[in-house]
Image (cartoon, helix red, strand yellow):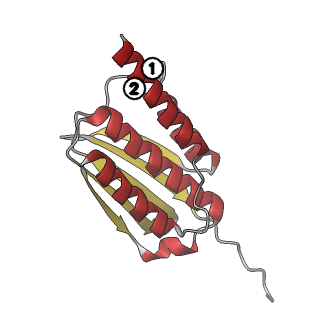
Amino acid sequence: MKTLTRDSMDALRRSLAGLRAPGLGARSLRQALRELCQDFSQRTGLECSARLETCIEDLNLPLSETIWRVAQEALTNVEKHALARQVRVTLACQPQGVLLTIEDDGIGLPEGAESGAGHYGLRGMRERVTGLGGVLSLENIHPGTRVEARLPVFVPLKLAGE
Protein backbone atom coordinates (compact mmCIF):
# COMPACT_ATOMS: atom_id res chain seq x y z
CA MET A 1 0.00 0.00 0.00
CA LYS A 2 2.88 2.36 0.84
CA THR A 3 4.53 1.67 -2.51
CA LEU A 4 1.29 2.30 -4.40
CA THR A 5 0.71 5.55 -2.51
CA ARG A 6 4.29 6.68 -3.09
CA ASP A 7 4.08 5.86 -6.80
CA SER A 8 0.77 7.71 -7.09
CA MET A 9 2.22 10.77 -5.37
CA ASP A 10 5.26 10.71 -7.69
CA ALA A 11 2.98 10.56 -10.73
CA LEU A 12 0.90 13.44 -9.37
CA ARG A 13 4.02 15.55 -8.77
CA ARG A 14 5.23 14.90 -12.34
CA SER A 15 1.84 15.87 -13.73
CA LEU A 16 1.73 19.08 -11.72
CA ALA A 17 5.29 19.92 -12.72
CA GLY A 18 4.27 19.45 -16.34
CA LEU A 19 1.44 21.93 -15.90
CA ARG A 20 3.84 24.47 -14.45
CA ALA A 21 6.63 23.70 -16.89
CA PRO A 22 7.83 26.76 -18.74
CA GLY A 23 6.83 26.89 -22.35
CA LEU A 24 9.17 27.50 -25.20
CA GLY A 25 10.94 30.35 -23.47
CA ALA A 26 13.73 31.63 -25.69
CA ARG A 27 13.99 28.33 -27.58
CA SER A 28 12.77 27.89 -31.12
CA LEU A 29 9.99 25.37 -31.69
CA ARG A 30 12.46 23.15 -33.57
CA GLN A 31 14.92 23.20 -30.65
CA ALA A 32 12.18 22.63 -28.06
CA LEU A 33 10.74 19.62 -29.94
CA ARG A 34 14.19 18.08 -30.45
CA GLU A 35 14.97 18.51 -26.74
CA LEU A 36 11.57 17.07 -25.83
CA CYS A 37 12.31 13.94 -27.89
CA GLN A 38 15.83 13.61 -26.47
CA ASP A 39 14.60 14.01 -22.89
CA PHE A 40 11.82 11.51 -23.54
CA SER A 41 14.29 8.95 -24.92
CA GLN A 42 16.72 9.40 -22.03
CA ARG A 43 13.96 9.19 -19.41
CA THR A 44 12.07 6.22 -20.87
CA GLY A 45 14.66 4.29 -22.85
CA LEU A 46 12.31 4.40 -25.86
CA GLU A 47 13.44 5.46 -29.31
CA CYS A 48 11.98 8.85 -30.20
CA SER A 49 12.69 10.39 -33.60
CA ALA A 50 11.75 13.87 -34.79
CA ARG A 51 11.26 15.01 -38.39
CA LEU A 52 10.70 18.76 -38.39
CA GLU A 53 10.38 20.83 -41.54
CA THR A 54 12.22 24.15 -41.69
CA CYS A 55 9.12 26.27 -42.31
CA ILE A 56 8.10 25.88 -38.66
CA GLU A 57 10.55 28.61 -37.64
CA ASP A 58 8.13 31.27 -38.90
CA LEU A 59 5.12 30.20 -36.82
CA ASN A 60 3.66 32.65 -34.31
CA LEU A 61 4.12 32.09 -30.57
CA PRO A 62 0.58 30.86 -29.72
CA LEU A 63 0.74 28.31 -32.53
CA SER A 64 4.26 27.19 -31.61
CA GLU A 65 3.34 26.90 -27.93
CA THR A 66 0.25 24.80 -28.77
CA ILE A 67 2.26 22.47 -30.99
CA TRP A 68 4.87 22.02 -28.28
CA ARG A 69 2.27 21.38 -25.55
CA VAL A 70 0.37 18.85 -27.68
CA ALA A 71 3.61 16.99 -28.46
CA GLN A 72 4.53 17.07 -24.76
CA GLU A 73 1.17 15.62 -23.70
CA ALA A 74 1.17 12.99 -26.46
CA LEU A 75 4.62 11.78 -25.39
CA THR A 76 3.50 11.70 -21.76
CA ASN A 77 0.60 9.46 -22.81
CA VAL A 78 2.96 7.18 -24.73
CA GLU A 79 5.17 6.90 -21.66
CA LYS A 80 2.29 6.16 -19.27
CA HIS A 81 -0.03 4.00 -21.34
CA ALA A 82 1.22 2.80 -24.71
CA LEU A 83 3.75 0.06 -23.86
CA ALA A 84 5.55 1.24 -26.99
CA ARG A 85 9.15 0.71 -28.09
CA GLN A 86 9.39 3.71 -30.38
CA VAL A 87 7.62 6.93 -31.23
CA ARG A 88 7.91 9.38 -34.13
CA VAL A 89 7.19 13.10 -33.96
CA THR A 90 6.65 14.81 -37.31
CA LEU A 91 5.86 18.45 -37.98
CA ALA A 92 5.07 19.20 -41.62
CA CYS A 93 4.01 22.34 -43.42
CA GLN A 94 0.96 22.22 -45.64
CA PRO A 95 -0.72 24.84 -47.84
CA GLN A 96 -3.34 25.70 -45.21
CA GLY A 97 -1.28 25.18 -42.07
CA VAL A 98 0.85 22.71 -40.18
CA LEU A 99 0.39 19.07 -39.31
CA LEU A 100 1.84 17.64 -36.11
CA THR A 101 1.83 13.83 -36.01
CA ILE A 102 2.90 11.63 -33.11
CA GLU A 103 2.87 7.88 -33.84
CA ASP A 104 3.86 5.05 -31.54
CA ASP A 105 4.03 1.28 -31.92
CA GLY A 106 2.24 0.51 -28.67
CA ILE A 107 -1.07 -1.08 -27.74
CA GLY A 108 -3.36 1.65 -29.07
CA LEU A 109 -6.09 3.65 -27.41
CA PRO A 110 -8.79 1.86 -25.43
CA GLU A 111 -12.41 2.30 -26.49
CA GLY A 112 -13.74 5.66 -25.29
CA ALA A 113 -10.32 6.84 -24.12
CA GLU A 114 -11.09 10.52 -24.54
CA SER A 115 -14.44 10.46 -22.80
CA GLY A 116 -13.36 8.34 -19.83
CA ALA A 117 -12.86 9.77 -16.37
CA GLY A 118 -9.40 11.07 -15.70
CA HIS A 119 -8.34 11.53 -19.34
CA TYR A 120 -7.70 15.26 -19.00
CA GLY A 121 -4.62 15.19 -21.21
CA LEU A 122 -6.52 14.12 -24.32
CA ARG A 123 -9.24 16.69 -23.67
CA GLY A 124 -6.63 19.36 -23.01
CA MET A 125 -4.92 18.63 -26.32
CA ARG A 126 -8.25 18.88 -28.16
CA GLU A 127 -9.13 22.17 -26.43
CA ARG A 128 -5.74 23.70 -27.27
CA VAL A 129 -5.98 22.70 -30.93
CA THR A 130 -9.62 23.66 -31.49
CA GLY A 131 -9.02 26.93 -29.64
CA LEU A 132 -6.75 27.93 -32.53
CA GLY A 133 -9.19 26.74 -35.19
CA GLY A 134 -7.49 23.37 -35.68
CA VAL A 135 -8.56 19.75 -35.63
CA LEU A 136 -7.20 16.97 -33.41
CA SER A 137 -7.62 13.35 -34.43
CA LEU A 138 -6.80 10.23 -32.41
CA GLU A 139 -6.54 6.96 -34.29
CA ASN A 140 -5.51 3.40 -33.55
CA ILE A 141 -3.08 2.14 -36.17
CA HIS A 142 -1.53 -1.30 -36.42
CA PRO A 143 0.36 -1.34 -34.16
CA GLY A 144 -0.05 1.72 -31.99
CA THR A 145 -1.65 5.12 -31.96
CA ARG A 146 -1.53 8.18 -34.20
CA VAL A 147 -2.25 11.65 -32.82
CA GLU A 148 -2.66 14.35 -35.46
CA ALA A 149 -3.08 18.05 -34.85
CA ARG A 150 -3.93 20.10 -37.95
CA LEU A 151 -3.54 23.78 -37.25
CA PRO A 152 -4.23 26.64 -39.64
CA VAL A 153 -1.63 29.28 -40.32
CA PHE A 154 -3.30 32.55 -41.08
CA VAL A 155 -1.53 34.79 -43.56
CA PRO A 156 -2.75 38.39 -43.49
CA LEU A 157 -4.08 39.57 -46.84
CA LYS A 158 -2.39 42.60 -48.34
CA LEU A 159 -4.69 45.36 -49.43
CA ALA A 160 -4.30 46.92 -52.88
CA GLY A 161 -1.68 49.63 -52.81
CA GLU A 162 0.28 48.19 -49.85
Image check: 133 left or right of 122? right
Percent coordinates x, y for residue 29 in the rendering: 51, 66
Q: Residue at x 22, y 41 (%)?
A: 84
Q: Please, what secondary structure does the residue beneath circle 2 have?
A: loop
Q: Residue at x 78, y 85 (%)?
A: 160
Percent coordinates x, y for residue 103 in the rendering: 30, 49
Is 47 situated above or below 145?
A: below
Percent coordinates x, y for residue 14 in the rendering: 48, 36
Q: Amino acid at mark 2?
A: Ala
Single out the residue that lies furthest toward the front: 2
Percent coordinates x, y for residue 5 in the rendering: 42, 17
Q: Residue at x 21, y 44 (%)?
A: 105
Is 112 situated above or below 37?
A: above
Question: Nearest the camera: 39 or 154?
Answer: 39
Q: Amino acid at mark 1?
A: Gly
Quadrant location, the C terminus: bottom right
Residue highlighted by disc 1: 116
Is 72 situated above or below 51?
A: above
Single out the residue that lies furthest toward the top: 1
Residue highlighted by disc 2: 113
Q: Residue at x 35, y 59 (%)?
A: 38
Quadrant location, the N terminus: top left
- What's the CA distance linking mark 1 and mark 2? 5 Å
Q: Residues within 10 Å of mark 1 (few under 14, many from 20)?
A: few
